[in-house]
Amino acid sequence: MTDTPRPADLDRAIGFTLPERNARGRVTRLGPVLDEILSAHAYPPPIERLLAEALTLTALLGSTLKDAGGQLTLQAQTQHGIVSLMVCDYKGGELRGYVQYDADRLALLGKNPSLFAMFNQGYLAVTFDQAATGERYQGIVPLDGDSIAQAAESYFLQSEQIPSLVRLGLGRDAEGRLIAGGLFLQHLPEGEEGRERLHTRLDHPEWGHVEALGATMGADELADSSIPLENLVWRLFNEESEVRVLAGAELSRGCRCDAEYITQVLGKFPPEERQAMADAEGMITVDCAFCARNFPVPLSDFTASPL
Ligand SMILES: [Zn+2]
């Protein structure tokens, strides 16, 4: 007799609320989606882990968007850091992301470089684009602290005055593929949802309680695909009088690059600049930074504009 393994709970995010505590949260876990995004690149392990954490955070924040066509973008960048740019975004359940870094300098840092060692004086920008209203909201915080999770917590506190807790955990499945899980908790007293608030109480007893429970969530539990996400919520909050679990979002890897758009952008360059971009065969090759796909565009696609 062998135990039947439980089906893995992966590539999904669920929301929940604790009405009596005026708190809300999200949990997510990424598996094949992560693998698909990472496998388009040949990142060294520290960059893979960094991007895995950032994508998990992107899934947590993106899945809070009420507007189905809205987009959440996470961008971390520095002037002179080893990692110069990291971009992740979420739209309608689709995730993508990439990292630009200096491989030679990174190799000198050893196996487990700190966030500071990779970014130096970095900044994290979080942008919410609402499709329905065309509204855009962006907040920027210094990328300090030990982790992306800490930077996200300070983003919510500084930019939105919302006490928040973010836990991210990484693990590997039996085949050695990365699994990443995340928990996100926020305190919204009196049902507040707005971004403008006058008073922020970090010492609110409701929040203190929720935060203390959330802090017990282990990285190993978050990244254990045999534990359904609903069970993670239950483990933390089973003594609360009410926990409402909200509908989940299925996550997938998606890129919005397209050949037509690229051709259109190239068409705006002066002909001599296009000529300079082309190889000996008269082919311009544009790479998508997110998915690493190549888009070859022949110079002959650009006919002379009518006078
Ligand atoms: Zn792409």
Image (cartoon, rainbow, N blue to C red):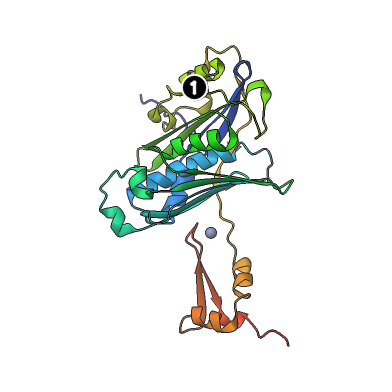
Q: Quadrant of the N terminus?
A: top left
Indicate the position of residue 198 as horizontal and vertical percent values: 64, 28
In front: 226, or 168? 168
Q: Is residue 10 left or right of residue 109?
A: right
Residue in the picture at 62% in, 15% down: 20
Indicate the position of residue 124 as horizontal and vertical percent values: 49, 46
Examine the image and state in which quarter residue 250 appears: top right
Residue 32 seen: no
In front: 54, or 258? 54
> Residue type at mark 1?
Glu
Crowding around mark 1 (Cα neighbors within 10 Å: few <14, some 14 to 19, many 20+) is: some
Residue in the picture at 49% in, 37% down: 152
Whether 254 is drawn above or below 154: the answer is below
Indicate the position of residue 106 as horizontal and vertical percent values: 31, 53
Examine the image and state in which quarter residue 82 appears: bottom left
Whether 83 is drawn above or below 116: the answer is below
SS class, disc 1:
helix
In front: 280, or 184? 184
Query: For mark 1, what is the residue?
Result: 211
Residue in the picture at 59% in, 17% down: 21
Whether 63 is drawn above or below 307: the answer is above
Q: Quadrant of the C terminus?
A: bottom right
